[in-house]
Amino acid sequence: MKTLRLVLAGLAVGAGGGLAWAAFAPPHVASRDELFEIPQGTWARRMAGNKVEILPSRIDLTLGLNDRLLLRNLDDVPQQFGPVLVMPGQSFRLPFEVASTYSFDCTAHASGQMSIVVAEAPATPWDRLRWRWNRMRTKIHA
Amino acid sequence: MRCVLALSLAGAWALASAAAPTPVGLKAGAFDPPQAAADFPDGVLASDGGALKLSRYRGKVVLLVFGFTHCPAVCPTTLATLAEARKSLGADAAAMQVVYVTVDPERDDAAHVRHYLAGFDPTFVGGTGQPQALEQLRRRYGVTAQKVPARDGSADYAMSHSTSIWLIDREGRLRALMPFGHSAADFAHDVRQLLALR
């Protein structure tokens, strides 16, 4: 019984410490580039009738953290993303400096639109928690 | 023959690879590696006379815009911004060339485009001409344009079109794409960066 209490207390301290870290530690990312790659053979798969989603219809970026959209075309044919035509083997890196929602026409999506939502860097503990939570969720779903 | 072709391709690739890297601090979105910008097909006419070819502007940074003169908001905003950017460049202004290609050749003939552009900056050059040639040009740059009929049922119409601006360096390489909405200061910044490339 005593051991169980100790384990539970340890877990509580660990969870509390984790939450405190997530709320107060300044967010950090390895690169400011939010990368989306078009794999080789994408066009061929599309031509074969497969539904291939490369970009989500909404992309979330954060100023000062991941505020550059990086599109890399590894396919053998040019690929169009909204207004951008990216040639085979080419990359396109688009920086953002203002928090806002940017909408682009994009025929690759059913809605015909692609949105890039650029948010301010999280400044409060609550904002940091939410940012880390959303980032983790995005990574899991990717 | 194959060897000659292979060598030519290798040479072309080496030349393309030799291009100075696009500066990382551009406000616009940058292409890496930069590639030769598609030249204009035959049938595209310049508002100042003759065929319109990109090669005419080697040595200058070209800002390529697609639009139509009846555009109520986006085109006037973009052209006014580019005129302001050009003015702010001072002595470097002569090395910046705006090329405005219509997506509405039905209403935008060369004289009309010239008159329209003169209201912003007399150095701006327009492009119009055969619809097929203009469509081919739009495909080369991934530009969309679509006629939108008037809601009142009249014969009037608008054009829905791509609003970005393409930035082409002095050597004719497509370097960057600036989405609509950037300031004159951002354009001037990027033009200066591209002019500094060697």
Image: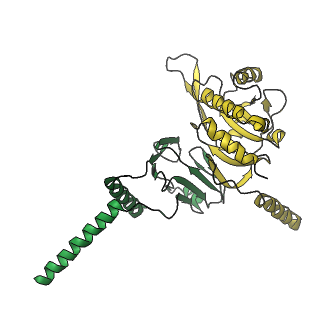
Chain colours: A green, B yellow
Front one among A92 and A51: A92
Residue A133, above or below B192: below
**In this view of the protein, can residue A112 be seen by the observer?**
no
**Quadrant occupied by the N terminus of chain B:** bottom right
**In this view of the protein, can residue B194 be seen by the observer?**
yes
Front one among A131 and A122: A122
Q: Position of residue B36 (x, y in %)?
A: 76, 50
Q: Position of residue B183 (x, y in %)?
A: 59, 36
- On screen, residue B19 versus residue A29, left or right, reads right
Front one among B149 and A92: A92
Image quarter of residue B111:
top right
Residue B74, above or below A142: above
Which residue is the extreme one toward the left? A1
Q: Residue at x 66, y 24 (%)?
A: B69
Q: Position of residue B130 (x, y in %)?
A: 75, 30
Q: Residue at x 60, y 25 (%)?
A: B71
- On screen, residue A18 versus residue B131, left or right, reads left
Q: Position of residue A84 (x, y in %)?
A: 61, 47
How many tags in the picture? 0
Residue B169, above or below B80: below
Q: Residue at x 42, y 60 (%)?
A: A27
